[in-house]
Amino acid sequence: MAPAIPIPADIAELTGPLILGHLFNWGLLGALCIQAYIYYLAFPHDPIWPTKALSSCVFILEVAQTFLNTRDAFRNFGLFWGDMLNLDLIGTYWLGVPVMAGIVSAIVQFFYAWRIWVLTKRFWIPSVIVVLSLTQSISAFIAGNAARRINHFSELQAETYVVTSVWLAGTALCDTVIAMSMTWTLLRARTGVHTTDAVVFRIVRLSIETGTLCAIFAVLDLVFYIVFMHNNFHLVPSIALTKMYSNSFFAVLNSRVKIIDGKLSGSFSTDHHSTVCTCSASAPPLAPVRFRSTGRIYPSNSTPGVHDVELTQMSSDARDGLEFESPEDPKRMLPIGNETSDSL
């Protein structure tokens, strides 16, 4: 039996970052669960592809990532507590940290590239994002495979210095390009209408905040990885890095949510003919009726909005007492039966 390695005086530099990383990871998983619940509650009619499919995939991957990392945490601090040889083993961190981060970040970055293409119909910006995303994702896979092969934290930084730098610098650069591109694209979409521009500025602010936050986490991980070579400081942002991308992804999806009088509402639309409208909960969607013009439906004797729903299904009885906001003159409220002929 090999003699036990004595616990060094600087043990906190090895175990402390692991504990903090797992705490942040679990905390962000809680935030992710809340965001996912809000999304599926508020937007049940979002298209299955790509929105719901990607959101489900991201959530499942995050649960799997948390399980893998928690398994290693239990190994370090439960089964083999005080065993320095076991603490140095990478275990399944190679899969739960670089590989999972590469997959989730690529999904989110591809989603942003697709949104920018939809808004601009130009390929060069999305192409740059896709290339950068593929570069960082492939580098993350290579770094993960190298970590699996080395299997010792004490040798990891010296052996994977280059590929890890490419991974983290690439993902930070990609996030920066996305934030700048979304800002430029959305600012060009301003219409001069106050309510519309307010929504645009809110999405711009959210894009800058989420993109910058992900980039900062990646840069911190890179700096800790390069500067502190003989401890685990880099694992604090690294373990939770994938959760930053998934939470940013759901934050963008939930940016359409409104809370009115303490009640949750969501604005959504399944195709380009549908109108986002607001109607009371007493007017449930029943028979199919479609309005093709832009505008909002408000209860005629109440303040706008209790629930935002898609105006593709509503019975004629439910339409009684509602008014149509004229797209030509937003201040002019028309009875629901007097829409212009091109709006039906």
Image (tube, rainbow, N blue to C red):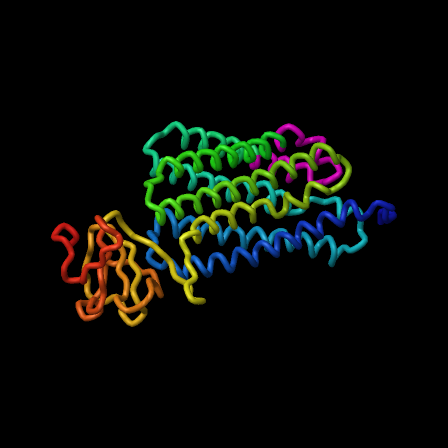
Taking 152 as reference, is 42 above or below it?
A: below
Query: Where is residue 331 drawn, in percent x and y?
Result: 26, 54
Quarter holding the C terminus is bottom left
Query: Where is residue 71 drawn, in percent x and y?
Result: 65, 55
Q: Does residue 112 appear left or right of residue 143 in this picture? A: left
Q: Could you tell me which residue is drawn at 17 percent across and 67 percent down?
A: 316
Q: Which residues are magenta?
A: 140-164
Q: Does residue 25 appear left or right of residue 279 in this picture? A: right
Quadrant for residue 302, please give it.
bottom left
Q: Does residue 224 appear left or right of residue 43 in this picture? A: right
Viewer-closest of 202 and 53: 202
Q: Does residue 213 appear left or right of residue 311 in this picture? A: right
User: Most extreme residue toward the left, as rendered?
Assistant: 341
Prevalent SS, magenta region = helix
Q: Could you tell me which residue is drawn at 47 percent across and 36 percent down?
A: 178
Taking 85 as reference, is 223 above or below it?
A: above
Q: Could you tell me which residue is drawn at 81 percent across and 53 percent down?
A: 82
Magenta segment includes 284: no
Taking 171 as reference, is 30 above or below it?
A: below
Q: Could you tell me which residue is drawn at 54 percent across and 55 percent down?
A: 63
Taking 344 as reference, is 120 above or below it?
A: above
Viewer-closest of 113 and 333: 333
Number of callouts in the render? 0
Query: Where is residue 254 drawn, in percent x and y?
Result: 44, 53
Query: Where is residue 108 drawn, in percent x and y?
Result: 47, 43
